[in-house]
Amino acid sequence: MVKNIISWDLGATKCAAAVVEYDEATHAFACKKQVSIRLSACRSLEELTSKLESALSAKMSDMDAICIGAAGHYDGEKLQHVTGYPYSMHFARIAKEQRWAPHAVIHDYAPIVCATFTSYMQQPHSVKRLNSREINPQGRRVALGVGTGLGLKDGILLPNGDFWLGHNETGHIGISTPPFTYSHYHERHDEFVKFLRCEEILGEDEALTFEKILSGKGIVRLYRFFYPESVEDTPEIIGKKMSSGEANDVRAMFAWYLGLFVGTVQLAYMPDGGIWITGGVVLKHINVFGYPEFFHGIEASPAFLTKRQEFPLGILCDAEHAFMGGAYYAVKRLL
């Protein structure tokens, strides 16, 4: 029998959704139709839901299950986000009024880590491996995303096919002086911190976190460090410069800090099931992983490095991973 699941990927600025079919006999997932809608194109959650249903030719009430991976914190009634949504995300009310199928609103990176439990990981176009290490099937996995914010979720696949997900928030980890690195990286890091404080980009007592460098306006801060007289002030414009090769120094420094973050996450979780990286910023600048600075950043934290080099590392490239993972969550928790 085939089950039909609607899987949402709800961010602060847009919502993507897909109808995913699950075959109970083969345990296979197939993404049949998907859509993406900017939140600003709607005036309410009701209108957003209506547009999703229309574009997908499927109603929430007719599905077997619904999984909503969402940025922010869901309190059982409403979804709250630190920067705010353009309208109330009162899922409990609308689900009751419209008689939705069984549903769950979960952390936006929970579906990403759930995708690593599926056959999605065996599809060459879905995953770009950064090493050839074997995945421990029951090992701890981390899904890490760099976009508007910095997302992370860890999980473990259990022998019976069920799973466990962690409860964590790693994007706000502060950056301390790297314990070991080449002197020019060390000096540049100190100069960058001094620059941020002198320009009052960073307050006198404000901590420098990975999120403030890698996501959102982080690229703007890196760019201004190298080009302080520049009037460029949007991540989109600077991102295009990086992609076209006009700001290779910015891209190399970004690669080093991303590697430093990956190394920090390795130490925190020791994930022998792998670290799997994705997110809008990463996928726009996937060539940063070809920079030696990325691996130098990982190695800047030398503790247990030999062991950490045995952990799988890769990039989730396909746009369907959130949908597949959401459907997997729905099968295990809602059906």
Image: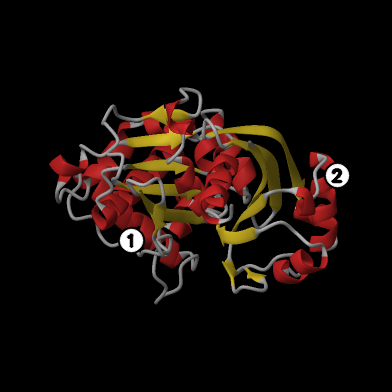
Residue 315, percent from left and from top: 43, 35
State whether residue 42 appears in this view. Answer: no
Say which mark, if any, is on residue 54. Answer: 2
Which one is nearer the viewer's eye here, 97 or 264?
97
Residue carrying label 1? 175
Residue 282, percent from left and from top: 49, 40
Q: Earlier in the sequence, mark 2 or mark 1?
A: 2
State whether residue 266 appears in this view. Answer: yes
Report which quarter residue 299 is drawn in.
top left
Q: Residue at x 38, y 52 (%)?
A: 155
Marks 2/1: CA–CA distance: 45 Å
Which amino acid, mark 2? Ser
Element marked by disc 1: loop
**Number of dots carrying numbers:** 2
Q: Residue at x 71, y 70 (%)?
A: 92
- Farthest top residue in view: 124
Which amino acid, mark 1? Ile
Q: Is the residue marked by circle 2 packed among few (<14), some (14-19), or many (20+) residues within 10 Å?
A: few
Which one is nearer the viewer's eye here, 285 or 128?
128
